[in-house]
Image: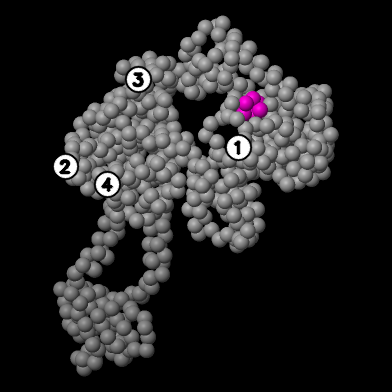
């Protein structure tokens, strides 16, 4: 935490204090109300003198008498009412009634029951008015001080690990390799880890040592955490999961203490797996001059390194970590003996996407027209998390329209919703804005259809989605792992098609192409500084990935002079200008097709692939086929 930041006031403690007082007062009012209701409903017996009791016995009205101490409870014949009276102390009731002239034969006809005063009920009734207030006050004090005691106990547990444990007996949260599609190579790499946790003897007898640390690397949503859980599920061992950010606190030494506690608990539960998600939160390169030598993050990282070195060969504890930024990790963390096994998780290809969709389609009733293969073909670049979101959004769309089955149309709409956001049909465009948007999107689509290395168009729409007023959906005919310079140049020209067409048709520029300019400029700069695709600059990598830490160097450092920087800017401008000229030539040559596509968009707002291809074929432009892509050279 920066030194200049002021400590925040603990408002939650004050709120809980007043909440406890209000709760106690509410309990008191409820008890008081119950007491008043109970006392109010109780029947008060009429009290009469002993002489009246004697007269009633003589007249034969009394059915029985109950004596408890000096108090008489008199019951009468034909009545349920009981009257109270008192006799003289130290004198029996028979003597008292005989003194009032009651004959012995009359006394013999009245049953007299003597109850001995005392017992638990007697003392409870007499002491309750004094005990209950004391009990309530004690409860009130305990209730108010409970949170204070809890806050005090937290000081003793502050350095304990906050890792979440998934027990091997927990069937509900157990994940196995069968629950994960794709990543075949990653699962093969981790199979021997599962064998070691199940039967370490066969490895130790031959002198083999399983790596102590396994680093899972891949883009966000590729399934790193899920794969780590699957290893624990396959091996049937305890799984301790914690985020790298949970180690770092404002107090120095807390993170290192939590690391020690985590490894101690895991060794006690061995065989076990420790999984640290987003390890780059504590594992970044040290010595960058940020925070100094006493930086809490660096102390936590040092403790992790020490704990991993302290493992014995027979320790059945495997440390797994995940990150999507392996380039910023400290070299000491990834050296042999620590996280020396690195498992890369790529984005799924078409077949893997289809398998992932099948897993996420469980418990979802599909209509007869659903074809997951088509959905997999239309989702290049989607991660496993994106595909899960796609299937979920498709089910939500079907439920919103009160249908019991998910159709192919729902899944197609879900693809666009995941990629671009929800439709904004309430975002109405004026007639002029609608015309500009239609020409803008038609410019993108037409340039993409003419250029040989651009992706084919699948859909054009001027219905707003997310932050875009319209969109052109371009999808490759097949998955690509490599991209050539010619493909990049065509992509830049396609991105600038909307900008060029606004200048050409309307003689003015709107704010619509702002994102197109950002994308094309960033791509042109990457071509020059990362990929060595500039003949003037040459094959030199001038910038690290994302401008972050590279090989221990600080953030934002430049390894080139101002002259080279000016040359980079000149090359980026040249690439952009050539892309604009290429797009402009195409739009001028095929002006009739541009006008036809724009008019159709203004009329129907959305054009699907089949209808779009009919439009461009009518104007002499042939749509791309897969065989055309296969015969194109890479460079």
Which residue bears the numbered disc 1?
630
Which residue bears the numbered disc 3?
286
Instruction: Answer with left or right where residue 259 lies relative to residue 467.
Output: left
Q: Earlier in the sequence, mark 1 or mark 2?
A: 2
Q: Nearer the viewer, mark 2 or mark 4?
A: 2
Which residue bears the numbered disc 4?
195
Main SS class of the magenta portion in the image = helix
Exactly how many numbered labels are in the figure? 4
Q: Residues within 10 Å of mark 1 (few under 14, many from 20)?
A: few
Q: Are marks 2 and 4 in contact (CB under 8 Å)?
A: no
Q: Is residue 359 visible?
A: yes
Q: Residue at x 37, y 21 (%)?
A: 285
Q: Tell me if residue 518 is in the magenta stretch.
A: no
Instruction: Answer with left or right where residue 577 lies relative to residue 345.
Output: right
User: Which residue extends farthest bottom?
Assistant: 105
Can you say whether 290 is above or below 589 in the image? above
**Quarter in which the C terminus is drawn:** top right
Q: Residue at x 22, y 78 (%)?
A: 67
Please state the horizontal and vertical placement of residue 307, each as a whole percent of the image.
24, 31
Which residue bears the numbered disc 2?
205
| Gap between marks 1 and 3 measured at Cα | 47 Å
* Picture quadrant where residue 149 is located: top left
| Gap between marks 2 and 4 measured at Cα | 14 Å
Q: Earlier in the sequence, mark 4 or mark 1?
A: 4
Q: Of helix, strand and loop, which one carries label 2?
A: helix
Which region of the structure is painted magenta?
Answer: 486-492
Please state the horizontal and vertical placement of residue 383, each as a whole percent of the image.
51, 41
Q: Is residue 152 visible?
A: no
**Quarter in which the N terminus is drawn:** top left
């Amino acid at each position: 935490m920066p030194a200049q930041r002021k400590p925040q006031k603990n408002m939650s403690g004050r709120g809980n204090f007043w909440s406890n007082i209000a709760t106690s007062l509410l309990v008191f009012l409820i008890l008081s109300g119950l007491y008043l209701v109970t006392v109010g409903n109780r029947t008060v017996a009429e009290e009469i003198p002993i002489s009246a009791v004697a007269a009633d016995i003589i007249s034969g009205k009394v059915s029985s008498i109950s004596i408890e101490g000096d108090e008489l409870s008199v019951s009468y014949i034909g009545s349920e009412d009981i009257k109270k009276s008192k006799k003289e102390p130290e004198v029996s009731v028979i003597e008292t009634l005989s003194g009032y002239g009651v004959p012995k034969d009359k006394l013999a006809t009245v049953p007299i029951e003597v109850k001995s005063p005392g017992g638990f009920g007697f003392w409870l009734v007499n002491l309750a008015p004094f005990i209950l207030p004391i009990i309530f006050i004690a409860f009130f004090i305990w209730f108010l001080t409970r949170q204070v005691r809890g806050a005090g106990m937290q000081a003793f547990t502050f350095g304990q690990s906050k890792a979440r444990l998934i027990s091997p007996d927990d069937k509900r949260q157990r994940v196995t390799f069968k629950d994960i599609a794709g990543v075949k190579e990653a699962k093969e790499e981790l199979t021997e880890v599962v064998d070691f946790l199940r039967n370490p003897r066969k490895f130790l007898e031959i002198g083999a040592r399983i790596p102590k640390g396994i680093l899972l690397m891949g883009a966000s949503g590729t399934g790193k955490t899920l794969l780590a859980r699957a290893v624990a599920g396959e091996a049937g061992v305890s799984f301790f999961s914690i985020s790298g950010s949970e180690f770092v606190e404002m107090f120095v030494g807390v993170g290192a203490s939590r690391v020690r506690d985590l490894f101690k608990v895991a060794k006690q539960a061995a065989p076990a797996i420790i999984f640290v998600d987003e390890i780059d939160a504590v594992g970044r390169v040290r010595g960058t001059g940020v925070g100094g030598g006493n930086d809490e993050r660096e102390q936590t990282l040092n403790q992790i390194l020490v704990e991993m070195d302290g493992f014995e060969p027979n320790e059945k504890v495997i440390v797994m970590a995940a990150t999507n930024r392996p380039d910023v990790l400290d070299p000491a963390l990834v050296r042999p003996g620590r996280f020396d096994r690195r498992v890369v998780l790529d984005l799924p290809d078409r077949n893997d996407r289809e398998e992932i969709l099948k897993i996420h389609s469980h418990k979802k009733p599909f209509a007869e027209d659903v074809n997951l293969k088509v959905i997999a073909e239309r989702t290049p670049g989607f991660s496993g998390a994106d595909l899960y979101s796609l299937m979920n959004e498709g089910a939500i769309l079907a439920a919103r329209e009160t249908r019991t089955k998910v159709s192919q149309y729902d899944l197609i709409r879900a693809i666009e919703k995941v990629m671009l956001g929800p439709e904004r049909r309430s975002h109405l465009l004026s007639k002029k804005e609608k015309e500009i948007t239609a020409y803008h999107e038609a410019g993108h689509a037409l340039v993409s259809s003419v250029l040989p290395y651009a992706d084919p168009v699948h859909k054009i729409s001027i219905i707003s989605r997310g932050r875009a007023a319209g969109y052109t959906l371009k999808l490759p005919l097949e998955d690509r792992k490599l991209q050539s310079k010619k493909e990049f140049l065509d992509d830049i020209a396609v991105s600038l098609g909307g900008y060029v067409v606004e200048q050409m048709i309307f003689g003015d520029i709107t704010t619509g192409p702002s994102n197109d300019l950002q994308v094309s400029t960033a791509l042109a700069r990457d071509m020059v500084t990362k990929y060595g695709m500039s003949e003037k600059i040459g094959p030199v990598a001038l910038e690290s990935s994302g401008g972050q830490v590279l090989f221990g160097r600080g953030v934002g450092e430049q390894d080139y002079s101002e002259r080279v920087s000016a040359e980079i800017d000149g090359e980026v401008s040249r690439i952009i200008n050539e892309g604009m000229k290429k797009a402009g030539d195409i739009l001028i040559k095929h002006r009739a097709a541009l006008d036809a596509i724009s008019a159709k968009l203004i009329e129907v707002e959305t054009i699907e692939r089949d209808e779009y291809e009919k439009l461009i074929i009518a104007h002499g432009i042939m749509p791309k086929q897969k065989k055309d892509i296969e015969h194109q050279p890479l460079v």
